[in-house]
Image (spheres, helix red, strand yellow):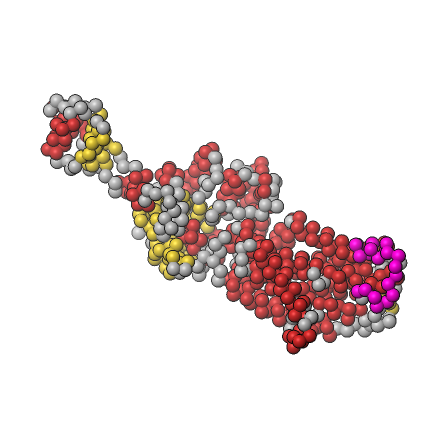
Amino acid sequence: MVELAIKTSQLTKRFGDQAAVDGIDLSVPKGSVFGFLGPNGSGKTTTIRMLLGLAEATEGTIELLGEEVPKRIEQILPKVGALVEGPAFYPFMSGRNNLLRIDAADRFADQKTTEARVESALNRVGLANAAKKKVHAYSLGMKQRLGLANALLKPRELLILDEPTNGLDPQGTREVRNLIRSLADEGITVFVSSHLLSEIEMLCSHVAVMSAGKIVAQGKIEDLRNEEPTRLILATDEADAAIDVLKSEGLGKSRIRGLQIITEVENDFDVAKLAAVLVSKNIPIREIRLEKPSLEEKFVKLTGEGFEVVR
Amino acid sequence: MKLFAKSLGLRLMASELKVMFTRRRTWAMLAAIALIPILLAIAVALSSERLSPGEGPPFLAQVTQNGFFTGFTAMLLALPLFLPLTVAVVSGDTIAGEAGLGTIRYLLIAPVNRVRLLVVKYLASLVFILAGTFTLMIAGALIGAALFPVGPVTLLSGDTISIFEAFGRMALVALYTTVSLSGMAAVGLFISTLTTVPVGAMTATLVTSGVSNILGNIPQLEWMHSWLFTYYWLDFADLMRVPIEWSSLVSNLVLQLGWIAVFGALAYGRFTTKDILS
């Protein structure tokens, strides 16, 4: 039995008669980097608000680090760092003073180590040089970094990061990715939401896909990817003969795209053997390869292609 | 002792005051409050006309004879609108301001207990009111002393008190006014939990004091007058007698505590169950 850092059961949040989050069962294993993927408006941030006790669940239960939310929220939160719906700071105070302010709000924070912890958090996100600048002079990316610094003010067991790379340039995005990796290496469970599949694919070991308030897929990224069939791509000038061979080899329906014949095959399909058979029948091969399923196809299949906001 | 300070949330209180007094807005309001007695004193000093006693606002005639009356007169002028305006700004901003900036979600997950945050926010607005009323009295004393003769003060009751004692009365008036405005600050705190738009909360809070003033001026509604939080506002004159007439201070205190209890409870009920969606 895997220990879970986050566990929800039938978690639901209704606004009026619309369910923003509709009975989701999240299972985030301890030590994982867990991607929470879904298009805009699919209920990711609402879920995160409920996890952190900012909003009350209409139905369902939440356990964070083995304790019940919202009942034990004050005991849990010191162990949890979070970035929710973008960073938010007092624009008229410096970045450093903003962090001191939030640390002062935390009754459980050790006052003696405040300064040192603030400095090290600022260093960790590369903001040490801008620490004395007022936040209104910060770029969006700098605010995002400050938000991350805030999440790292104390040693944490769990980080909940809502769209952590929003507003960052490619350089900053890479740094944040590296930061998250290094945090995960320290054994911290990282729960990161994003609408960008590529982000999740690069970072995460596990993923849950939200669509219109429901979780439509959840598990290890590898497992999810393997749910999609592998494709055999074969390009030849003698398509008809080739298709006959494929049929005799027991493969299913193929479709033709230009010179290519595309057929779904098992994950462990032996290409070399097929190639040998084709060659033995004198069918010229321009190209033959297996295409591993991409997560993107799976994602689009699960959440729909459209650009329109679903609701 | 340290644990005691910790549980009281003194660190959060200190941080709250630091945020408040880092804002230029706070200083601008205090400066504007200080301007009231200054403008008043200059206007009186420049005017050649001498008011006969009883003409114009109370105390105005005395200002030229004794500079110490500047602060009292300015308080009378500032109480109906200007001081409530600053109270509306500060108390309306308490929760709505944090919600508008979004900082409230980071405070709450820091974590800070919601009740504790509410209490600290309210106490901080009282500190601002205290700063405002003392600013007004001190600015009044300084400009009065600069432009007019000062000396032992002849009170409404005809008695004369020493300069030293006059300072005591000034402090008392500032405290009395702070008490007067404390009920309104609780109303502002409650309104502030209703919205994420601070300007809306500020305006609504100011409207409540306006409405209270208007109701207080309608004789047909006399039965409700003594329940209005503005009812005792101008009665600080009772502190200008020998012996001091404490009764209005006591009734005022009881009335304000009532408003604080009711609107504090409403703010509590609202804020502790509110979904933070900003």
Considering depth in this image, is A67 or B54 the residue closer to the camera? B54
Decide whether residue B251 is among the magenta residues. Answer: no
Can residue A8 be seen? no
Can residue B200 be seen? yes
Q: What is the quadrant of residue A15 in the picture?
A: bottom left
Q: What is the quadrant of residue A10 in the picture?
A: bottom left
Residue A118, given in percent of the width and then of the height, sits at: 56, 44
Left or right relative to B217: residue B237: right
Left or right relative to B222: residue B39: right
Q: Residue at x 47, y 48 (%)?
A: A85
Residue B223, given in percent of the width and then of the height, sits at: 65, 77
Residue A245, given in percent of the width and then of the height, sits at: 12, 30
Considering depth in this image, is A113 or A307 the residue closer to the camera? A307
Q: Is residue A230 above or below residue A14?
A: above
Q: Residue at x 66, y 73 (%)?
A: B225
State which region is magenta: B38-57
Q: Is residue A216 above or below residue B253?
A: above
Q: Residue at x 80, y 66 (%)?
A: B58
Q: Tag count in the figure?
A: 0
- Single out the residue that lies furthest toward the bottom: B223
Q: Residue at x 19, y 36 (%)?
A: A265
Residue A148, given in percent of the width and then of the height, sits at: 49, 43
